[in-house]
Each structure stands twice: as structure tokens, then as C-alpha cells.
Image (tube, rainbow, N blue to C red):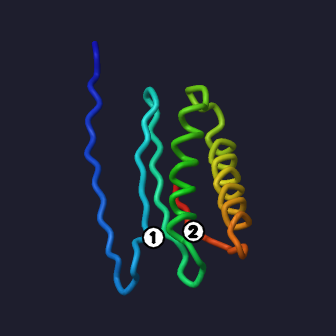
Amino acid sequence: MTVKKRYDSGQASLVGNRRNNQDRCILVESGNTMLLGLADGMGGHPRGEVAAQILMDSCRQLLRRTPLPIRFPGSFLNQLLIMAHEGILAYGHSQNPAIDPRTTAVV
């Protein structure tokens, strides 16, 4: 018996009084595994939208290269957040002058 996957997804975002949208969300599937992520660049820090996007890109990259099934989800999530954090730091240090972008993370 074959079971078809059925789900709906959607997103909404309000820019408010900002010039750009710092909200990001992602739904990534790999086999029978699904990863959902939500990020919101932190106000008061430059380029929060880039930090949020780096988190989303990290979600996609790590899930696609991780063998399934994920045997230790806690370790996977820890690795994901470290990967995103290091990517955000590298981006910030590569700017001239260096900046400190930040984002919230829910995965």
C-alpha cells in the first residue's frame, strides 16, 4: 500500500515600518523527512535579512547532505545552528567594516 503525502504550507509577513523584510521561512523535504524553519533578522543589528537567509540556506544544505533517517535529531539541530552561526559570523567579518548581523531561529 502506498501512502501519499499531503500537507499544506503557507507564509505571511508584515514589513511594518522597515524598508526591507527580514523574515524568512523554509520547508525542506528529503525522503520521508521534513524540516521547517523560521527566522527573523534582529532589529538594531545590520543586515538581519542576510543572517536570516544564511540560516535558511544552512537548513537546506545540511538536510540534503545528512543520511536519513536522522538518528540523533538533537545533534542534527545543534550542528545546524552551529553551521548557520559560523556562516553568519563569516559574512559579518567579510564586510568592510565588519558588522554583526543577527537573527532569531526556530527549526
- The residue drawn where x is 42% and y is 57% is 25
Above-or-below relation of 16 to 12: below
Label 2: few (<14), some (14–19) or many (≥20) C-alpha neighbours in 10 Å: many
- Please state if 38 lies on the left or on the right of 83 as rendered: left
- The residue drawn where x is 48% and y is 69% is 40
Q: Which of marks 2 and 1 is nearer the N terminus?
A: 1
Q: What element carries label 1?
A: loop
Q: What element carries label 2?
A: strand
Q: Position of residue 82 (x, y in %)?
A: 70, 53
Measure the alpha-carbon separation of dots 2 and 1.
9 Å
Q: Position of residue 106 (x, y in %)?
A: 52, 59
- The residue drawn where x is 36% and y is 87% is 17
Label 1: few (<14), some (14–19) or many (≥20) C-alpha neighbours in 10 Å: many
Q: Quadrant of residue 20?
A: bottom left
Above-or-below relation of 33 to 37: above
Can you say which quadrant of the picture contains the N terminus?
top left
Q: Residue 22 carries which label?
A: 1
Above-or-below relation of 28 to 24: above
Residue type pointed to by label 2: Thr
Query: Which residue ends up furthest to the front in the rendered image?
Result: 96
Disc nearest the viewer among 2 and 1: 1
Above-or-below relation of 48 to 1: below
Residue type pointed to by label 1: Gln
Q: Are marks 2 and 1 in contact (CB under 8 Å)?
A: yes
- Please state if 79 lies on the left or on the right of 21 as rendered: right
Disc 2 marks which residue?
A: 103
Q: Where is residue 45 in the image (x, y as percent from the top left)?
A: 60, 79
Residue nearer the viewer, 88 or 67? 88
Residue nearer the viewer, 38 or 45? 45
Q: Position of residue 42 (x, y in %)?
A: 55, 76
- The residue drawn where x is 72% and y is 56% is 86
